[in-house]
Image (cartoon, coloured by chain):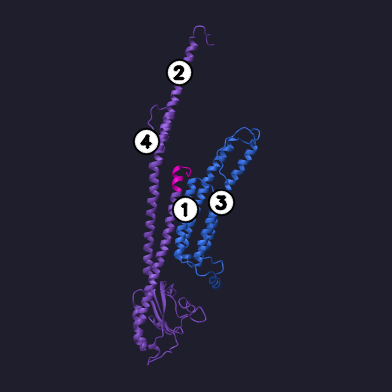
Chain colours: A blue, B purple
């Protein structure tokens, strides 16, 4: 979705939408911006739900049978998973900060949710989830929290502009 | 509050730094904890090996009294929670706690199940698989290992008692040491890491805040004060100095203000001239209505 730039209220001319239509367009954009801002919250909520499961060592799912373990092979070394987590957290934070700097409005929380769940899964498979749960949780909260902050600040700014624009069009009775 | 420049600049940096430092500290703590536990297990394996070697002669001679005394003395050592030797059938033959002697060990219990998981008990396990961590009946945390006592040529050919040469395993030594020293070390480490984490956070977030305030916020505040002074009609306020961009902006305001004043003065002059002309019309000009 593109960022709505500043607009000026102009009188209806031939070929241009009238105030009523423009008002509807702005209201649609406002609804979209609200939905976009809520995505960050959804991402955080889903991550917290997955984390609750991880904290209980995924006791609600059946244990991995020796046959499946034999099929999948041994888990990667736990130290390697932890190094991968540190590198991932570092690069994700750098990318989020750079997107913040460039004023991008894209939300990458869903892919981060996938990566973080994969880390939980790897630790679970390596039987080291309990020792490393808090590290993944802290990484997830930081990354998804920053993603949410980035999208929320962008949407708040865009919403403010849209509301100004809506106000400049006047009340529906004026039209 | 979140719309202010300070919040916009500090919140993302502070969150990113805080989160990353916490993640790294947790991972580092997990690494160190793993290394310390591995080290403790290796030391315990060496200790078990020393006990087996030092009791070898008593076992060979079937000197049960001497063996009982040795096990009892080891069990009285500070930090040793339990030490016992049980035979192949799982019957405790010697223990630092006399009440345990002749009691049978459950092969499905932790420390036994690792070897007895399959139909044929395994005779070789790595040191990490031999180890187990649990809380004993006294509520103390214990790190225990089970070390197998293998059959040797001297054992199977001894005159006093004998074991069949094909019998691989004669018994198992089970020794458990208190985890309290390890836990104390980890608690100290946790405290130091939390302190280090706090110091890094204070330094980085405080540094960003201080630099931002010194180089951005204060010059902007001065510029706002300058613009307000111009708006209030002050004639010669000085533009802010110290930061190139702010200085340029200040000079631009100053120039804008100078031109505005000049234009206003010219307009005033023209208006006065117009008023004079209206009051004293030139010859041939009609008087103002």
Label 4: chain letter:
B
Q: Which residues are magenta?
A: B1-11
Observer-side mark, 1 or 3, equals 1
Which residue is found at the position 51% from the left and 54% from the top? A144
- In the image, B248 versus B121, the foreground residue is B248
* Same subunit: marks 1 and 4: no
Q: Residues within 10 Å of mark 2 (few under 14, many from 20)?
A: few
**Which residue is identified by label 3?**
A39
Q: Mark 2 — on which chain does it sit? A: B
For the residues labelled 1 and 3, say whether their Cβ atoms are less than 8 Å apart. no
Secondary structure of the residue carrying numbered label 4: loop
Query: Is the same chain shared between marks 4 and 2?
Result: yes
Q: Secondary structure at mark 3?
A: helix
Disc 2 + disc 3, Cβ < 8 Å: no
Residue A162 colored in magenta in the image: no
Q: Position of residue B40 (x, y in %)?
A: 38, 71
Marks 4/3 same chain: no
Q: Quadrant of residue B162?
A: bottom left
Residue that badge 2 annotates: B269
Instruction: Give percent across and percent down for residue A43.
Output: 54, 54
Give how far across and how far down residue B280 sits, in percent: 48, 9
Q: CA distance from mark 1 to mark 3?
A: 18 Å
Q: Which mark is residue B241?
A: 4
Say which residue label 1 marks. Answer: A93
Q: Reply above or below: B182 against B156.
A: above
Whether labels 2 and 3 belong to a single chain: the reply is no
C-beta proximity under 8 Å, tags 2 and 1: no
The residues bearing labels 1 and 4 have C-alpha atoms spaced at a distance of 35 Å
Instruction: Kindly indicate the quadrant of the structure image that contains residue B43.
Output: bottom left
């Amino acid at each position: 979705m593109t960022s709505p730039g500043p607009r000026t209220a102009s009188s209806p001319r031939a070929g241009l939408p009238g105030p009523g239509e423009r008002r509807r367009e702005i209201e649609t954009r406002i609804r979209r911006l609200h939905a976009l801002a809520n995505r960050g919250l959804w991402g955080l909520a889903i991550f917290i739900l997955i984390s609750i499961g991880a904290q209980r060592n995924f006791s609600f799912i059946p244990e991995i049978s020796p046959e499946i373990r034999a099929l999948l092979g041994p888990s990667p070394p736990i130290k390697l998973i932890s190094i991968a987590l540190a590198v991932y957290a570092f690069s994700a934070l750098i990318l989020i900060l750079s997107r913040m700097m460039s004023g991008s409005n894209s939300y990458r929380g869903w892919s981060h949710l996938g990566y973080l769940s994969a880390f939980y899964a790897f630790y679970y498979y390596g039987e080291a989830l309990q020792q490393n749960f808090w590290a993944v949780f802290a990484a997830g909260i930081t990354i998804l929290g920053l993603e949410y902050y980035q999208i929320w600040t962008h949407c708040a700014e865009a919403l403010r502009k849209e509301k100004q624009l809506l106000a400049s069009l006047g009340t529906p009775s004026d039209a | 509050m979140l719309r202010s420049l300070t919040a916009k600049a500090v919140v993302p940096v502070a969150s990113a730094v805080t989160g990353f430092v916490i993640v790294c500290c947790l991972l580092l703590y997990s690494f160190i904890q793993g290394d310390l536990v591995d080290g403790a297990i290796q030391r315990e394996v060496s200790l078990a090996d020393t006990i087996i070697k030092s009791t070898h002669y008593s076992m060979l001679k079937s000197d049960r009294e001497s063996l009982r005394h040795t096990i009892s003395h080891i069990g009285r050592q500070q930090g040793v929670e339990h030490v016992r030797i049980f035979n192949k059938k799982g019957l405790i033959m010697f223990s630092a706690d006399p009440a345990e002697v002749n009691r049978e060990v459950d092969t499905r219990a932790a420390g036994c199940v690792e070897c007895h998981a399959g139909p044929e008990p395994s005779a070789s396990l790595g040191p990490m698989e031999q180890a187990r961590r649990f809380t004993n009946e006294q509520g103390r945390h214990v790190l225990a290992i089970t070390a197998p006592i293998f059959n040797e040529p001297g054992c199977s050919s001894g005159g006093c008692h004998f074991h069949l040469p094909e019998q691989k395993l004669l018994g198992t030594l089970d020794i458990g040491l208190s985890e309290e020293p390890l836990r104390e070390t980890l608690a100290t480490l946790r405290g130091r890491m939390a302190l280090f984490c706090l110091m890094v956070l204070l330094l980085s977030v405080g540094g960003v805040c201080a630099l931002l305030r010194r180089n951005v916020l204060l010059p902007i505040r001065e510029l706002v004060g300058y613009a307000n002074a111009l708006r209030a009609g002050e004639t010669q306020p000085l533009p802010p100095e110290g930061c190139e961009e702010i200085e340029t902006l200040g000079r631009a305001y100053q120039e804008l203000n100078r031109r505005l004043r000049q234009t206003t003065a010219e307009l005033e002059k023209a208006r006065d001239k117009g008023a004079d002309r209206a009051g004293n019309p030139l010859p041939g000009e009609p008087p103002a209505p």
